[in-house]
Image (cartoon, rainbow, N blue to C red):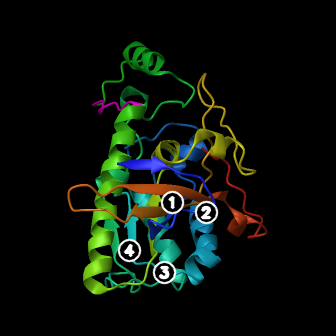
């Protein structure tokens, strides 16, 4: 079980286990086109590549030794991870991979929300409108699954609970110094769902970096391209293999300082 906790001073019976760095991918072709990619693949644009390289030169990459690095298996996310890690000094205890610096653990649970018939359509269309558009225009491409907000939240919870268990066991068995730093390269939908699940909504709303998107009918918390969102995870001291409860604290929301004065970079589509 995980409970949001925004107190600046955590009770003494809590153990600071993890610091999570949730990073959205760089600008994708779908972002540029104003379409909804969802779980379809959409490559990084030249701007997206430049954003990832700018991130690699930031303190998030140069000053942090990551215990683990995770990424969605969609190319726009893991390409952002590779570009960021190639040029940065980020290191991992777990060993090297093809980028020569750190293992990138790909996980389907970190994917964007699945939007079914809306994928590949204008982001302004609702599910019903996108379905009708396909019928009217004779678009018979296979339509993938559709996830509700609860579905993607469940994915977030499942992934983080597993990570907490693995981190706690590794810290005990290998006597690792905590907090363990974990980078997570994902998507706006997944990061938004994680923040809304583990952080008090009032805390998000009053943060100076909080912005709302022009989402269809209902505004949503904006997650800019390559923004860094940081969450601390505090483990209850009575954690067991069967019940490992924890609390969280928001450290940073939507930091894009690495894009300021970076060759005039400005992402065209923030969400």
Q: Are marks 1 and 2 in contact (CB under 8 Å)?
A: no
What whole-number distance in Å separates the C-alpha atoms at marks 3 and 2? 36 Å
Extent of the magenta region: 142-148
Front residue of this view, candidates 214 and 32:
214
Front residue of this view, candidates 173 and 113:
173
What whole-number distance in Å separates the C-alpha atoms at marks 4 and 1? 12 Å
- The reply to whether residue 1 is visible in this rendering is yes
Which residue sits furthest left? Answer: 242
What whole-number distance in Å separates the C-alpha atoms at marks 1 and 2? 22 Å
Give residue 108's position: percent from left, percent from top: 30, 53
From the image, state whether disc 3 or disc 1 is nearer to you.
1
Give residue 137's position: percent from left, percent from top: 42, 17
Which residue position holds label 1? 22
Which residue position holds label 4? 68
For the point 54% across and 82% down, the residue is 87
Which residue position holds label 2? 9
What whole-number distance in Å separates the C-alpha atoms at marks 4 and 3? 15 Å
For the image, the number of numbered tags is: 4
What whole-number distance in Å separates the C-alpha atoms at marks 2 and 4? 26 Å
């Amino acid at each position: 079980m995980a409970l949001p906790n925004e107190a600046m001073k955590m009770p003494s019976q809590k153990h600071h286990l993890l610091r999570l760095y949730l990073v959205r991918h760089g600008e994708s072709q779908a972002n540029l086109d104003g379409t909804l990619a969802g779980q379809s693949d959409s490559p990084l644009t030249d701007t997206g590549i430049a954003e990832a390289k700018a991130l690699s030169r930031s303190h998030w990459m140069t000053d942090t030794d990551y215990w683990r690095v995770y990424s969605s298996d969609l190319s726009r996310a893991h390409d952002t991870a590779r570009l960021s890690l190639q040029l940065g000094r980020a290191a991992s205890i777990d060993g090297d991979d093809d980028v020569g610096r750190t293992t990138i653990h790909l996980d389907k649970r970190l994917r964007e929300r699945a939007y079914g018939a809306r994928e590949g359509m204008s982001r302004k269309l609702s599910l019903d409108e996108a379905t009708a558009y396909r019928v009217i225009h004779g678009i018979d491409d296979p339509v993938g699954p559709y996830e509700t907000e609860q579905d993607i939240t469940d994915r977030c919870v499942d992934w983080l609970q597993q990570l907490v268990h693995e981190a706690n066991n590794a810290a005990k068995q290998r006597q690792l110094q905590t907090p363990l730093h974990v980078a997570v390269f994902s998507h706006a939908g997944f990061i938004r769902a994680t923040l809304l699940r583990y952080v008090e909504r009032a805390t998000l709303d009053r943060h100076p970096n909080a912005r709302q998107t022009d989402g269809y009918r209902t505004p949503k918390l904006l997650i800019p391209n390559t923004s860094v969102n940081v969450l601390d995870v505090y483990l209850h001291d009575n954690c067991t293999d069967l019940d490992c409860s924890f609390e969280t604290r928001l450290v940073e929301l939507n930091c894009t300082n690495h894009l300021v004065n970076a060759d005039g970079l400005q992402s065209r589509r923030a969400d």
